[in-house]
Amino acid sequence: MPFGTNSFRRAVVIVLAIVLGGPTVLAYAESSEPNVAWHIGGQGLFDPTNNAYAINAGTVTVDLTRNETCCPTGLGHLASGRTSVNEIEFLFDTPRAGNYWLHVSWNPGGSGKEQFEVSCNELDAGKSKPVNGEERPYQRIDERFGVKINQGSNSMKLRHLSGDGLNFRDILLSSSKDPFSLPPSLSPNLKYPTLKAYEMAIKEAGTMLDSTYVRIFAPKRKESEAKTILRYLVRAYDQLYQIVGVHTDYKIVVYHFPQGHPDGWGGTSNCTIWYSQKNLDFQSDAEWKQYGVPHLCGYIEEMAHNFVSASNAQFGWEMIGWSVGTKVTAKVADNPIQRQRVQETRNEQLRTFNRYVQLGYRFPQDIQPNLCDRIHAHILFLCEEKYGLGFWRDFFGEIRKEQPRLLAASKLGDSDEARNKRYQITIDCFDRLKGIEFKNMLKSLDISLTIDVKSLQSESPSWNRKFIR
């Protein structure tokens, strides 16, 4: 641990490493990465409410020598009823002097000509790029500033120069200049960023287990089970990365809540997986009791959805994520029960697909409309079977080539226009795979080449059960 007396003390506490058959997994510690002094995003110090910190004459002090501190999610006007945050001052201690880099990831919001400056120990470290939020709305910008750190006490300031408000994705002080060597951040809007916040939510002692890309929260009494699950999820993340070729937008955070808790709804949002504590009850898990493998397909599918989201691919609601997640589950957590469940699901998809064709390319009226992507799942399965090994890796290789176009489309937000543009680019990528003739297949099945299924309002009772207009 290079510096920060309080952070160094925390690091000593977590020297315990748990090697769980594969990558090393460390019990959680703030700033446990060897090149990192402090990491606002990684330590869960952003305050998503922007109400927990004090604002004194426009300045917020983030004292990193204290256990209890939090940071604004940006500069400017951040919360209704509160004054603007004009400056953030970070206070921290170091055991020795040195040259470091402040890495700031931010976006300009949707309006205003945004810019900020950085100083360290009253010495100017530079200004950010001036960015017009109307021209580049919410576009991510990564910048770094060289700073000289003193032995002992230090002060770092980020001061708003212009605009009506900008947003931080991450703020990190490191001895490394290379942004690719830095650990991922947590989502700035994480609902329970710390162990204390999670324990308050579940009303009992908890545990927080960490790896580079996955973090798990669980009740303390289920720590052993949570460690087992984390071992598998670390391997699953690696397999998904090998297929998709990009990391998730943020570190994956997995929560486990008591039965009936509103946050244990069993899904994912913004790199967060919300599950019930029932998943930790191994004694009622048939896969665990019979084969010594926990039931993991749900976790891995939700993780896969976040990889697909990071790639900006768009096809068939969640069916790219389901398909890739199923493939990875078979690699890292294979067992006869899981294989049988996948086969049953594929059989149901095939039956629905056959009925769709028999009905003149109209989705059956007696099946819930939110299951309409069974058709897309079967199409992807047929393509994978026809193409053979490397289907998904080659597809995502094409997707990565299209990132400039996909990113431009994603800037339009969660709109039909954005979704349809990403859908069209995704279809182009599938169509480039030799022997698939993806567009011809979709045409023959009366599936639109320009309109994504969600944009057809397929969840509406008035949907005509067709995949084309």
Image (cartoon, rainbow, N blue to C red):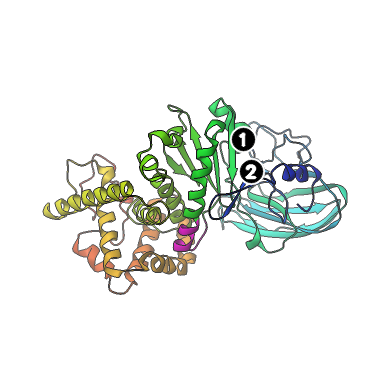
Numbered circles on residues, count: 2
Secondary structure at badge 2 equals loop
- The answer for how far apart the CA atoms under marks 2 and 1 are is 10 Å
As displayed, is residue 277 above or below residue 5? above
- Magenta segment boundaries in residue numbering: 238-247
User: Is residue 386 in view?
Assistant: yes
Q: Give neighbour class at mark 1: few <14, some 14-19, many 20+ (Cα, 10 Å).
A: some
In the image, taking residue 250 as reference, residue 319 lies left or right, namely left
Q: Which mark is residue 28?
A: 2
Q: Quick one: label 2 or label 1, which is nearer the N terminus?
A: 2
Question: Mark 2: which amino acid?
Answer: Tyr
**Is disc 1 placed on a helix, strand or loop?**
helix
Q: Quadrant of residue 409?
A: bottom left
As drawn, the residue found furthest toward the top would be 203
Would you say residue 121 sits in the magenta stretch?
no
Relative side of 232 to 16, left or right? left
Circle nearer the viewer, 2 or 1 = 2
The residue lying toward the viewer, choosing from 239 and 201, is 239
Which residue is under mark 1?
A: 195
Q: Which residue occupies the foreground of this view, 40 or 219?
A: 219
Q: Position of residue 390 (x, y in %)?
A: 37, 68
Residue 260, percent across and down?
Answer: 43, 26
Q: Which mark is residue 402?
A: none
Of the pair 158 and 197, the residue shown nearer to us? 197
